Every structure is written in C-alpha cells, then in structure tokens.
Image (cartoon, rainbow, N blue to C red):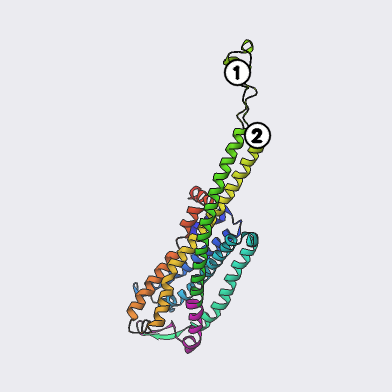
C-alpha cells in the first residue's frame, strides 16, 4: 500500500476512479498499520514481558477497534467504486459525467468523516483504560475495563453497524454490481469486435477504390505502345485519400479510448470480485451464529468460532493488500511509473 501511494502521488489523481482507488489505499494502509502495531504491542507484553505503567496487552486489544473503523471505510469506498462504475457502464449517457474528480473526492471525504464521527465517540467512551491492580507485576497499572455501558449499549450498536449492516449490505450490493459489470463487459467486447470487423472491411474497400489504374493496353494502337518499363506511373496511386486517413485516425482514437475505459472497468470489477470473495466468510460466520447460537465466543463451539475469526482476519488482511497488483495489471501508466520508480 505504501508503494501504491507513492506511485499514485507521482502519476497524479486526475479522475474519479483514481480518487476512489487512492482513498481505498489510504484506509487500507491505516487499517493494516493499526493491526500491525497492535500485534507488536501484544508480542512485547506476552513474549518479551515488557510491563510499563500502561498495559501494552490491553492497548493491543483496543487498537483493532479503530482498525475496524478504517476497514469499514475501505468497505464503503469499495461499495461506492463498484456502484459508480456500474452506473457508468449500465447507463453511460446518464452517468458519464456525473462522477467527476471533485464529486468523487467529496464522497470519499464524506465517507471518512461520517464513519469517524459515528465510530470514535462510541469507542473512546466505551473502551476506557483505568487504573487497576495487575497480579503479574504486583502493581497498579492502566488496564482496560469492560464497562456495563459498553456491554449493554455500545457493543450492540457497534456490532449492528460494523459487523452486520455494513458488511452484509456491501457484500450483496457489490456482488450485484460485479455480475452486472461482467455482463456489460462481455456485451461491449462482442459489440466492439463486430464493429471493428465491419470497419476494417469498409476501410479496405475504400482504400482499394482509391487506386487508379492505367487503361488497358489493348485499346492503344500498336504504333503508340511503349515498353512497360517506359510507361509513366504518375497517375497510379496506392495511397488512401485524406478522407480515409481521417476516418482511420478517428477510429484509432476511439479504439484507444475504448481500451482505456475497458481496462479501468476491468480493474474495478476485479477489485470488487476480490472483495466479494474475501468478505464472504465474514457473512458466513454471522449467519452461522444466528442459526447455531452456540457458535460464539462463549458458546459450546467457542474454539471453532475463534479459529474462524482468525481465518477471517487473515482474509481481510489479504483483501487490503492485493490492490497494488490489480493496478499494475490494468493501468499501464501506473505500471510504467512503478517500474521507473522502483
């Protein structure tokens, strides 16, 4: 993600799609950095027995809640990106100019701001660090305390928004957009191939028709005939007319624009598909816990539940780490800047 940000800043963010990709990369980076710091603090406390006044273990427990906030931001931005491109592909005339750079920037800033305003006050008030006696060090330290306010009021709201509403709504909406994008892409490719074949045939006919040929030598008296080597060839032209050249130029420009738009759409589709696949276990865990109440952290299948959560966290990390390879595959300018920079 750091490499992707550097390349984005060098290439510039000139359109709405680039703004969305850049915003996703920023939130992915912050989320992963939060998880990394939490993991390192946990290792310092449990493995290396570093015991300062502030409990590093409980800090490592609280930090992932803030990481979850940025994961939700990435999820909402991915949702916006998929809907944006889906609208442009499904209804290009209506939405072609609606998602400008400034509007996409405003939406991205709005998603960041709304998520933080909703999330941070709950988390700060519900996850306090308070002085408490630590048996391991036989001293008073700042430790995390599960408050009744957190358990009874904050956590149900937090779970409803962060663990249920955002993932489920985003999952099915992005899945629908992915299916629609795939169908429209196939239709566009088939139409483009037919149009390209027809255009090539017409251009060949036009070029051939511009060629001028000498009159048949049978109509010329034998007395006036010259050898074929001595015949002037000024009137013979094998070059296409200016109109044909202009037609070829227009078709070439349209073809380049189509290929660029196609690769952008493919990039969005791949990012959306990766999100749907790697976010699916999260949805599966939730619905399984509804059908099987013992599938929970304190239920009969608590160990299995914990393993599933760890696997889900790993998939989330992968989801936030692979977009760079999508950019390299489908953005030639991004790839060129990446190669020259690194």
Q: Position of residue 244 (x, y in %)?
A: 64, 38
Instruction: Give the label on residue 103, or none.
Output: none
- 35, above or below 193, in the image: below
Left or right placement of residue 235 versus residue 149 in this view: right
Residue 241's tag is 2
Residue 19 vs residue 295, the one in the foreground: 295
> On screen, 314 above or below 245?
below
- 314 relative to 243 in the view: left or right: left
Q: Nearer the viewer, residue 294 or 306?
A: 294
Task: Name the secondary structure under disc 1.
Answer: helix
- Asked whether disc 1 touches disc 2, contact meaning CB atoms under 8 Å apart, the reply is no
Indicate yes or no whether the magenta region holds residue 218: no
Picture quadrant of residue 243: top right
Instruction: Estimate how packed mark 1 is, as few (under 14), some (14 to 19) or many (20 or more) residues with alpha carbons within 10 Å.
Output: few
Spot occupied by residue 60 in the image (x, y as percentages of width and height): 43, 75
- Identify the residue shown where x is 61% and y is 12%: 222
Residue 99, image x, y percentages:
63, 62
Closer to viewer: mark 1 or mark 2: 1
Does dot 2 land on a helix, a strand or a loop?
Answer: loop
Is 148 inside the magenta-drawn segment?
yes
Q: As displayed, is residue 302 above or below residue 74?
A: below
Residue appearing at x 41%, y 74% in the figure: 284
- The residue stretch that appears in magenta: 135-164
- Residue for badge 1: 218
Identified at 52% across, 61% down, the residue is 181
Q: Earlier in the sequence, mark 1 or mark 2?
A: 1
Residue 148 location (% of width, % of height): 47, 89
Task: Kindly report the distance in space between the C-alpha atoms of the residues bearing marks 1 and 2.
Answer: 29 Å
Considering every residue shown, the one lying at the far top of the view is 223
């Amino acid at each position: 993600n750091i490499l992707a940000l550097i390349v984005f800043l060098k290439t510039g963010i000139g359109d709405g799609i680039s703004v969305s990709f850049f915003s996703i990369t920023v939130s992915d980076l912050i989320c992963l950095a939060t998880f990394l710091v939490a993991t390192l603090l946990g290792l310092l406390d449990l493995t290396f027995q570093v015991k300062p006044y502030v409990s590093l273990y409980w800090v490592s427990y609280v930090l992932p809640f803030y990481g979850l906030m940025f994961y939700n931001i990435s999820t909402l931005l991915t949702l916006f990106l998929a809907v944006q491109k889906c609208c442009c592909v499904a209804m290009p005339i209506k939405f072609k100019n609606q998602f400008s750079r400034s509007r996409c920037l405003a939406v991205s800033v709005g998603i960041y701001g709304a998520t933080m305003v909703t999330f941070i006050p709950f988390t700060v008030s519900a996850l306090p660090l308070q002085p408490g006696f630590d048996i391991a060090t036989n001293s008073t330290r700042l430790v995390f305390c599960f408050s009744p306010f957190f358990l009874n009021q904050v956590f149900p709201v937090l779970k409803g928004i962060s663990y249920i509403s955002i993932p489920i709504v985003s999952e099915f909406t992005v899945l629908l957009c992915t299916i629609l994008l795939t169908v429209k892409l196939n239709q566009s490719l088939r139409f483009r191939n037919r149009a390209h074949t027809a255009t090539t045939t017409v251009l060949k006919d036009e070029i051939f028709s511009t060629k001028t040929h000498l009159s048949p030598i049978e109509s010329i008296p034998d007395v006036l005939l010259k050898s074929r080597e001595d015949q002037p060839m000024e009137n013979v032209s094998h070059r296409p007319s200016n109109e044909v050249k202009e037609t070829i130029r227009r078709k070439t420009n349209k073809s380049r624009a189509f290929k660029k738009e196609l690769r952008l759409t493919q990039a969005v589709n791949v990012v959306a598909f990766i999100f749907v696949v790697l976010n699916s276990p999260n949805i599966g865990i939730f619905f399984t816990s509804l059908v099987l109440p013992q599938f929970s952290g304190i239920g009969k299948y608590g160990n299995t539940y914990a393993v599933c959560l760890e696997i889900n966290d790993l998939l989330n990390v992968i989801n936030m780490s692979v977009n760079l390879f999508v950019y390299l595959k489908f953005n030639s300018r991004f790839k060129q800047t990446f190669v020259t920079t690194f």
